[in-house]
Image (cartoon, grey):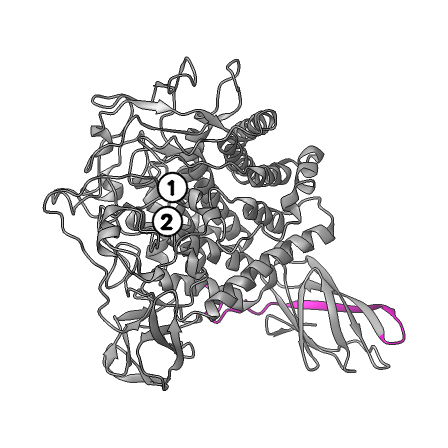
Amino acid sequence: MTSLPAALLTGALLLGGLAAAPAAPGASATTAAATSAVRVNQVGYLPDGPKRATVVTTASQALAWQLRNASGTVVASGSTVPRGADAPSGQSVQVADFSAHRATGSGYVLTVDGSSSAPFDIRTDLYDALRSDSMAFFHHQRSGIAIDASLVGSAYARPAGHLGVAPNKGDVSVPCQAGVCDYTQDVRGGWYDAGDHGKYVVNGGLSTWLLVNSFERAERAGKEAALGDSTLRVPERGNGVPDVLDEARWELDFLMRMQVPDGKPFAGMAFHKIHDAAWTGMPMRPEQDPQPRELHRPSTAATLNLAAAAAQCARVIRPYDAGYADRCLASARRAWTAAKANPAMYAPASDSTGGGAYEDARVTDEFYWAAAELYAATGESAYRDAVTSSSWHTSADAFSPYGFGWADTAALGRLVLATVPTGLPAADTARIRSSVTAAADGYLARMAAQGYAVPVPADGYFWGSNGEVANDAIVMAVAGELTGDARYRAGALETMDYLLGRNALGLSYVTGHGETSAQNQHHRFWAHQLDASLPHPPAGSLAGGPNSALQDPVAQERLRGCAPAACYIDHIDSYSTNEVAVNWNAPLAWLAAYAAERTSDGGGEPPAAACAVTYTVTNSWNTGFTANVTVRNTGPTAVDGWQLAWTHPAGQTVTSAWNATVTQSGTAVSARNTDWNRTIAPGATVSFGVQGTHTGSTSSPTAFTLNAGACA
């Protein structure tokens, strides 16, 4: 058993809230017993994506595998690759790769050495349902609004919670803990953080940022329609605003209500959290909660989370509601100013009665993240200076081996600066982008070294490890966006395989997705295991995942001696392995939206387009040259994503490029768009430059293709 490194233990203990509850009499455990030695993504695979399975076996020689369709016909076959001992899982494994099979269908089964996998699909719309379900999780978790059966079904409908309607005591007029303040605050709304009824700014800020960022990334890719108005099951559908932004706004409103009012001590700071005075029992629907509610002292970390999320709101939501964007920006500015005036107000680790402490005594990373978002939103020099003077701006540790999280946010600042155009010098932006790809390379290397292709290290199976896995996938997806390198997309998709069944337990950690999925996550309403009249968690709910520290009584009793990647039990009282939380479902929703996007022709390449190309050698010396390439869209529709190809007639070799990602194989050269110049409107142009070497001639190419179509 490997425990969490000491430096990370404090933060990880409360990733999902310490919602401890005694086991109910007669409650039974549902263990995650694998049904097959052949572990696959039980939902399936994309036609153009990676398709690999892990086989648990003591055999040392390669084994034959066969892929059968629903009719039992063998459609592909091959041999596994022995991997031997896989330390995180404690298993001996081999890997079967059937990526070459791209035909679509349902009911595929992979058979190896007499064992058959769970059935799965291969189809382009594989992740559409998960995109919707994982996002619907947040609507289910809303506080202060009735959850209507027409949107969620009768089993999940419930009255509004915590609006001061008996037996609730809040949240419309909540007092502070003794000694914190002498007034009450209206902090209704927002999302319940996890399986309890607490609401935490640091987790809420991160989760809101991820939802908005998922839309922002889709918008850069020209795929935002899938997250647009009337695409999700939310009550605001049909209002002209993308539904994912409507959902984020529900939490943003709460975050801004948590800001200390003008005229009060610590004005502009954010209260760290609001929850019951003591842990509520289980089960307990929100509107039945009789506990008094309390505001907890403001913290610098919470204040900077508010600043970052609100500044992002001001930038992304402005096209849909300029007035609300102005409100967000004003709140972000107030929070930044207050945090600068109170830079060391730390949430204490001891504040864990009735809710998680979410303590964090290092907030330089939150300052960096908030400064990056405020700079991206305003372009103002004060925020730029805060970015460039931060030690995190050049630190090699912004992307840690454990990804990012509510207590480690420097990576979010890097992701903002890597993808949002700012006034930073080009060399600075290039360095930041390189840090994203370097982190992604590290995750890919870790995946390649493990039998289950998981991007986390062997000691990374701590509280909320599944959220960590999904966060790492986000970094890989962004690296793919920045470079056009298909390896990163493949890595991001393979992390989904892990979450959906290709893991040490052969279990999908997402309720309702996969042949064998988690059903008894720790939650006070979705508590069927304790009360048969209550529902299981809704489809799309992600369990926290394996936690080798065994931090609840059920895990300690039933998982003793487990290998790190197998320290999980699908039991409602195992809150340290099986709770849900907004900061785990948020990266899942981000990843599901990304995975659900259709590649333009099903094969990963954009469609052909009409074009004209001008190639000009701008400088030449004895062994080197530079050239400028301009591409004009001569067609009637916009080009969304481009790849320009040509052959150097005199054997020139490209050594570097700018404003495009350029690769060369022999004399064949390929240039892909960057994120900021992927779209070429009809009649518009994009330009990029190359530098290279020659052996006496710099003759210009005579033929170009854009997305495989010939250019004039």
For badge 1, the amino acid type reads Leu
Q: Tell me, yes or no, whether the highlighted magenta stretch contains residue 499.
A: no
Horizontally, residue 171 falls left or right of residue 70, namely right
Residue at image location 46% in from the left, 48% down from the top: 6
Which disc, if any, is residue 14?
A: 1
Structural distance between the alpha carbons of marks 2 and 1: 8 Å
Q: Give the percent coordinates (x, y) of residue 345.
A: 52, 28
Can residue 125 be seen at all in this image of the molecule?
no
Q: Disc 2, disc 1: CB below 8 Å?
A: yes
Q: Quadrant of the C terminus?
A: bottom right
Is the residue 341 above or below the residue 378 in the image? Answer: above
Q: Where is residue 38 in the image (x, y as percent from the top left)?
A: 29, 74
Figure check: 62 above or below 601 = below
Q: What stretch is highlighted in magenta?
A: 598-623
The residue indicated by pointer 2 is 463
Callout 2 amino acid: Trp
Q: Find out whether residue 609 is within the magenta segment.
A: yes
Give the SS element for disc 2: loop
